[in-house]
Amino acid sequence: MIEQDLKNADLKTLFEMVDKIGRKRYHRLTSADLEDYRKYDNWRYVQADPELGSTPISKKWVADHSTPTCPVCGDAHYLRGGKNIDHKMPRAQYPWLSMNFQNFWVICRACNLEKAEMNWYEYERHCFKNYPDRYHHILEARPQKLLLSLVNEN
Ligand SMILES: [Zn+2]
């Protein structure tokens, strides 16, 4: 599929396509994929333990890649539990994207908890339905390049 087709595809088509690719890929996970999953915890947390706090390198990344307000709800992060790095494509389903920075964005803790393990397209659909006035922010954050890379590797 060429890039233009993907850009023009409607949400339902994209959702079905990526969901299919995610499921297919998930059945041939390698130990390297799971290693990426662990690598993220080592990068993010002191001794890979969230209780011990964030590492200086991931704190700096968050500071450099976030705005004062959450891109989803528009509130100041500190009012909603602080800044969280969310994996746009959940790492439970896409562990090989755990350490892919294109897959990261900084949202508030409350929005992160609400997103939970939703696939990006489930999440877009969820926001479109529940927060239509905020939907354009979600659309801007769509991980287009990652989706293309998923399509191209299959
Ligand atoms: Zn938020």
Image (tube, rainbow, N blue to C red):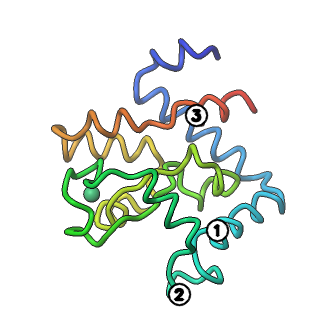
Nearer to us of marks 1 and 3 is 1
> In the rendered structure, are the residues bearing label 1 and label 3 in contact, judged by CB atoms less than 8 Å apart?
no
For ligand 1, give the image quadrant: bottom left
Instruction: Report helix, strand or loop for mark 3.
Output: helix
In this rendering, position of residue 115 left or right of residue 102: left
Q: Badge 2: how crowded within 10 Å, few (<14), some, or many (20+)?
A: few
Q: Is residue 3 above or below residue 20?
A: above
Give the mark, 1 or 2, whose residue is nearer the N terminus: 1
Q: Is residue 11 above or below residue 109?
A: above
Give the mark, 1 or 3, whose residue is nearer the N terminus: 1
Q: Which residue is mark 1?
A: 43
Q: Which residue is mark 2?
A: 52
Q: Is residue 135 above or below residue 35?
A: above
Nearer to us of marks 2 and 3 is 2
Q: CA distance from mark 1 to mark 2?
A: 13 Å
Q: Which residue is mark 3?
A: 147
Q: CA distance from mark 1 to mark 3?
A: 24 Å
